[in-house]
């Protein structure tokens, strides 16, 4: 996917470098990101394989992909924690590396580096490293998430560690937030609080947010659009309001087994078919079709192939729509 951008590229550094020249603009401004043709190799594996993505200042983008799709590698590359073999990452406004790190919040999926600390010591460490650390805001987050400064990080449950990661990542009120599976293992109340805090930051400060998640249901409340990631590449980008409306599924029941109604069925291009799956049920076959767009073209094509079949439409959740689009990418690749 080639993503165009209006970001200033005058000061681009050579491939595999993060472009972050000195800013002449004020702190507190939303940050935009443009990733172009990113490649990161681990031996023979390409964790990023020509990855392209543009996130406008103040936008919230959800990255959805299977384990190993490249989402965590992308975040590390943005932060300069992992090297790029090719490609460029550019930020708007122009920032030097210190300013970029001071204005970016990263919420990882693990806190192993803090294992030997208490919650309080971890926060004190973050305060020394982060010039924009906001004590009053941090105390508010601690109270909201019911975290005890005296507790050992190692002794915290998976859900409590996720709460602490969230506080550490947002303690300095960042202008760009990168969240890598931030809600794994948290309870329903914590889940609600985290999404509410992020929504408040977006509304109040115009914070730019990039969220990688395996829980697509989180997306509806927060993100502007979803980008599907598969094998180190960014594929379909779709507005969150369109995701369920455009992702349709029908189930075809009762076609005669002798009828050529199976997963290899060919539909016209205007049908927008994403995925087909077939099963044999006794003397009949059942075909499940997921497509992008209106159901009419698909139903019309099936009616010509198997007029005896019964067609039912299925209303998909966000989770189901994301899962079928990911399956479709896997089939294509």
Image (spheres, rainbow, N blue to C red):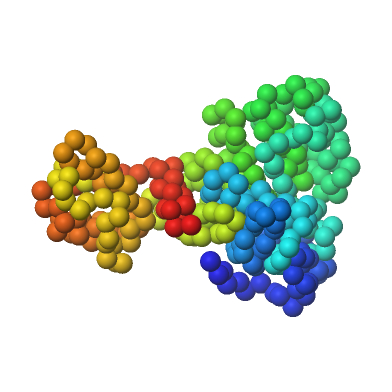
Q: Is residue 272 above or below residue 119?
A: below
x and y percentages locating residue 250 in the rendered image: 26, 48
- Residue at the spot x=47%, y=52% of the render? 330
**Left or right relative to 202: residue 281:** left
Q: Residue furthest right?
A: 128
- Residue at the spot x=77%, y=72% of the render? 14
Q: Is residue 143 visible?
A: no
Q: Is residue 122 visible?
A: yes
x and y percentages locating residue 244 in the rendered image: 38, 50
x and y percentages locating residue 329 in the rendered image: 46, 55
Q: Nearer the viewer, residue 32 or 58?
A: 32
Total numbered badges shown on the rendered structure: 0
- Residue at the spot x=17%, y=41% of the render? 284
Q: Nearer the viewer, residue 10 or 327?
A: 327
Q: Residue furthest left?
A: 308
- Residue at the spot x=54%, y=54% of the render? 230
Q: Quadrant of residue 135?
A: top right
Q: Nearer the viewer, residue 92 or 205?
A: 92
Q: Nearer the viewer, residue 14 or 308?
A: 308
x and y percentages locating residue 48 in the rendered image: 64, 57
**Left or right relative to 3: residue 146:** right
């Amino acid at each position: 996917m080639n993503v165009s951008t209006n970001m200033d590229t005058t000061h681009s550094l050579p491939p595999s470098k993060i472009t972050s020249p000195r800013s002449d603009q004020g702190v507190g401004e939303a940050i935009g990101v443009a990733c172009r043709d990113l490649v990161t190799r681990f031996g023979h594996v390409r964790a990023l394989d020509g990855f392209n993505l543009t996130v406008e200042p103040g936008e919230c983008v959800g990255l959805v992909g299977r384990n190993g799709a490249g989402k965590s590698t992308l975040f590390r590359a943005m932060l300069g924690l992992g090297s790029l073999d090719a490609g460029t990452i550019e930020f708007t406004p122009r920032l030097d590396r210190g300013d970029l790190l001071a204005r970016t919040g990263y919420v990882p999926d693990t806190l192993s580096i803090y294992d030997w600390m208490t919650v309080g010591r971890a926060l004190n460490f973050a305060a020394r490293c982060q010039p924009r650390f906001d004590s009053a805001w941090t105390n508010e987050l601690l109270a909201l998430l019911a975290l005890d400064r005296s507790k050992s990080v190692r002794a915290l449950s998976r859900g409590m560690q996720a709460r602490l990661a969230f506080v550490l990542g947002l303690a300095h009120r960042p202008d760009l937030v990168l969240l890598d599976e931030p809600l794994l293992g948290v309870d329903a109340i914590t889940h609600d609080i985290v999404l509410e805090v992020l929504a408040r930051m977006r509304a109040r400060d115009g914070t730019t947010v990039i969220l990688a998640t395996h829980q697509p249901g989180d997306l509806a409340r927060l993100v502007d659009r979803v980008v599907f990631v598969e094998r180190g590449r960014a594929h379909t980008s779709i507005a969150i309001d369109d995701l369920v409306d455009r992702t349709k599924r029908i189930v075809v029941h009762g076609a005669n087994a002798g009828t050529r109604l199976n997963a290899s069925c060919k539909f016209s291009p205007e049908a927008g078919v994403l995925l087909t799956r077939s099963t044999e049920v006794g003397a009949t076959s059942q075909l499940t079709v997921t497509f992008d767009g209106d159901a009419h073209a698909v139903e019309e094509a099936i009616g010509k192939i198997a007029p005896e079949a019964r067609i039912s439409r299925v209303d998909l959740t966000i989770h189901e729509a994301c899962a079928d689009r990911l399956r479709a990418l896997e089939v294509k690749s």
